[in-house]
Amino acid sequence: MRVRAAALALMLGACPALAVQPDEVLPDAAMESRAREISQQLRCPVCQGENIDESNAPISRDLRLYVRERLLEGDSNDQVIDAVADRFGEFVLFDPRATGANVILWLAAPLMALVAALTAAGFLRARNRPTPEVEALDPDERRRLAEIMRDP
Amino acid sequence: MVAIYQMTVPMVGAAKGWHGWMDSARPAALAQLLLMVISFGALTIAFVTSDFSVLLVYENSHTLKPMLYKISGVWGNHEGSMLLWVLILALFGAAAALFGGNLPPSLRARVLGVQASVSVAFYAFIIFTSNPFWRMGNPPFDGRDLNPLLQDPGLAFHPPFLYLGYVGLSMAFSFAVAALIEGRVDAAWARWVRPWTLAAWVFLTIGIALGSWWAYYELGWGGFWFWDPVENASFMPWLLAAALLHSAIVVEKREALKSWTILLAIMAFGFSLIGTFIVRSGVITSVHSFANDPERGVFILAILAVFIGGALTLFAVRASEMTAKGVFAPLSREGALVLNNVLLAVSAFVVFIGTIWPLVAEMVWGRVLSVGPPFFNQAFTPFMIVLAIALPIGSLMPWKRATMARSLRPLRGPLILSAAIMMLVFAVSTGHSALAVIGAGLGSWLIFGALADLWLRTGNSGAARLLRLPRADWGKAVAHSGLGVTFVAVSLILAWQVEDVRVAQVDEPFAVGNYDLVLREVRRADGPNYLAQQAVIEASRDGTPVATLSPEKRVYPVQGMPTTEAAIDYGFWRDLYVVLGDEQPGGGWAVRTYIKPFANWIWAGCIMMALGGLISLTDRRYRVAAGAARATRPGAVPAE
C-alpha cells in the first residue's frame, strides 16, 4: 500500500500542469482577458493541434508567461503575436496570415460561393427559359386525330 | 490457427459478393455479412477473454479494464476500427439485399455489386496493411491497456455511430453508380436512395454529437468543437449528406436536379473516404507522421482514386443522359433547395480547404503553417448565417413558383418573436456581444419558423389535424428546430461563458458568477485500473446548496498517462463545470471553474436533428414504397 501511495505521489507529481495556472493570471482583468484571447490564437509548438491556452506542455506555459510579460510592457495584441511568430514561425499562428499563397486560402470561400451562386443562377435561368408554346393542331393533324379516334 | 482461418474468411466473403451475378448477389451479400460477423465476433471474444496472444489485444487491452471498455477496445484502435468499418459495410449490403425486394432486379444487383467492390478494396486494405489478427509467439502476461482518454462511455459508442454514418453513405454512392450504369434516374430512384442517406446522416449526426460531448466533459476545459482535422473529416460528409438529403427531395418530388444529386452522392461518400484517409494516415496532423505509415495512407488514397475517380468519369460520360422533367422558377421550393445545396456544398468546401491547406502550403511552397479555429469561424460562419436566414422562408415556399410576399406572410409571428428574443438577449448580455444577439435571434427564427410551418400545414384547422400530418412534416420541423436550438446554444455558450482559475484553500469559499464554491477535501478514489485523487467541492447559490462536485485527477499506471475528470453539474440553463488541478506548494489546490450557459442545448439540438431524421424515416411513404427504410433502424434504437 505504501509503495502504491509513493508511486501515485510520484506520478501525480510528474503530471503536467493543466492549462492556465493560477500563478500566471494577471491582476488586471482586462489585460488578462487580452492575454487569453491571444493565447487562444497561438498553437502549441509541440502538441497536436492545441492552442497554448489549453495546452499542458511546459513550452506553452512559457509562452503564456511570455505573452503576459509583453502585454505588461505595453505591446499591442498584434505585436505580441508577431513576436511569438518571429521566434517559432508561422506554424504557431492558428489564424493564418493572408500573405503570399495564403491569399488563395482566404479568398477560396468567397470565390467558391460566387462561382456556385453564378452556376446555380445560370442553371436556374436555363430552366426558366419559356418552353415553346404548344401550337394548335393544323388541319392535317386534326384529320389524322379524327381518323385515330374513330371507332375501328 | 483460428486467426489464420479468420483472415481468409472476409476474402471468401468478398469474392462471393464480387462475382455475384444478378440472383446470387443477395445470398452472397448475406453470406458476406455472416462471415464478417464471425470474424468481428472472434476479435471481440479475443478482447473479452483478454487473449494476449493476439498482438492487437495485447496492445490495446488489459485484464483489469472494465468489460464495456474491453469491448469498445475492439474498435479503439486502427485495425479493429477498420474491421468495424467493413462489418458495417457488409451490414448495409446485406440490409439492401434483404429489404431491397422491391427494387428492380438489375438495379439491385448493380447496387450490391458496387457495394461489394468497395468491400473488396477495404478487405485488401485490412489484410495487406492492418491485419487485426496477428499472433504473437510468446503471449505476454498482461496487456498495455487502452488509451485512458478513450475509456469512456461516450467514446465507446462514438466510432460505431460515426462509421454507420460514413459507411451508410456508401449506399448512396452505390445507388448513384448503379443509376449511372443503368442510365436512369427518376423519382423512384430518389425514393430508394433517400432513406439510406437519411439513415446515414442520422448516424453521422449522433456520432458527431457523441464525439463533441465527449470532448466537452473529458478534455477538461469544456470545449465542444475544435475544428480539428479529424473532426472536420466527419463534418464534411455530414454537410454533404445534408445537402444530398435535400436535393434528393427535388429529384423525388419534381424530377429535377438529377445529375447534381448523383454528383453529391458520389462526393458525399468521397468525403467519407477522404475522412478515413485523414484519420487513418495522420497526413494532416503532420506530414511527418504520414511518413511513419505511408503504406496505409497510400492504400486508402488509391482506393479513393479508383472509386471516386471511376465514379466521376462515369458521371462525366453519363450525366448528360439524365434529362430533367420538372420546370421551376428561381423563386420556388426547388430554388430554395438549390440555395440550401449551394450553401452546404460551399461550406463543406471551406472546411475542406481549411483542413488540407497546411498540407498544400507545405508541399507546394514549403510554408509550415496552421489553419485553426479563427479561420474556420470567420470563413464558415457567414454561410451558416445565410442558411439560417433563408431556411424558414424557403421551407414555406410552394413548389414550382413562389412569391416572396406570400412566403413571408405566415412568418410574421416568428419574425416578431425572434426579434423580441434578440432584444431580450441584448438587454441581458452585459458585454452586448453581437454574437449572442445574432445567434439567439437566428436560432429562434429557425425554431419559430419550423413551428409556423407545422401550423400552416394544418390549414388552421387545429391541433387534431396536427397529429395526422405526414411524419415527414414532423421530421422536418423537429430537425430544423434542432438546428435552431444548436445555433442558440453555441452562440450563447461562446458569448456568456464565465471562467475562473484560482488556488482554492480547503474550507475557504470563493465566488464564481452567481455561485459560491468551497473546497472541502481532496481524497483518494482509485478505480479498477487507475489511481485517482478526488476533490469534494460544494456549490451553492444565494445560500442554498446546488450540488456537490467531485472532480478527479487520474493516473492510469499501465500507460503512465494522467487524465483529469471534470465534475459537471448539468442544468437546463447552465452547466457548472469544475476541474481539479495540482496541489500548490504553498497549500491549497488549483481549481478551474466554468459556468457554461445552455451547454446541454448544443447536444439537445443535435439529438433533435437526428430524431427529426428518424421520424422522417418512419414516414408512410418509405414504409410502403421502400421497405428498405426499416432495415436501417435497429442500430438506432439505443440512441433514442
Image (spheres, rainbow, N blue to C red):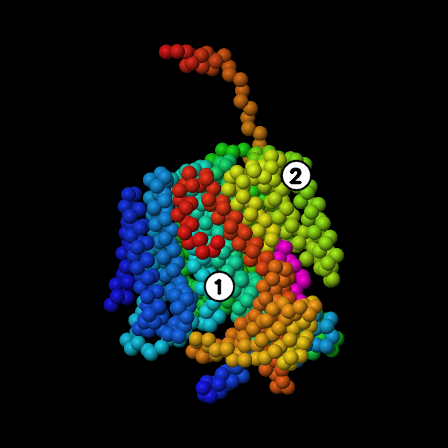
Q: Quadrant of residue B430?
A: bottom right
Chain assignment, label 1: B
Give the crowd class for mark 2: few <14, some 14-19, many >=20 residues within 10 Å.
some
Q: Residues within 10 Å of mark 1 (few under 14, many from 20)?
A: some
Q: Is residue B167 above or below residue B477?
A: below
Q: What residue is at 42 percent from the left and 38 percent from the top?
A: B625
User: Which residue in the structure is indicated by mark 2?
Assistant: B410
Give left or right: position of B41 versus B516.
Answer: left
Residue B495: percent from left, percent from top: 67, 61
Q: Quadrant of residue B544?
A: bottom right
Give, as a three-letter code, the residue at label 1.
Gly
> Percent position (x, y) of residue B88?
38, 55
**3D distance between C-alphas at marks 1 and 2:** 41 Å
Residue at left 34%, top 50%? B94
Magenta-span inclusion, residue B510 = no
Answer yes or no: are tags 1 and 2 on the same subunit: yes
Q: Which mark is residue B522?
A: none
Q: Which residues are magenta?
A: B487-499
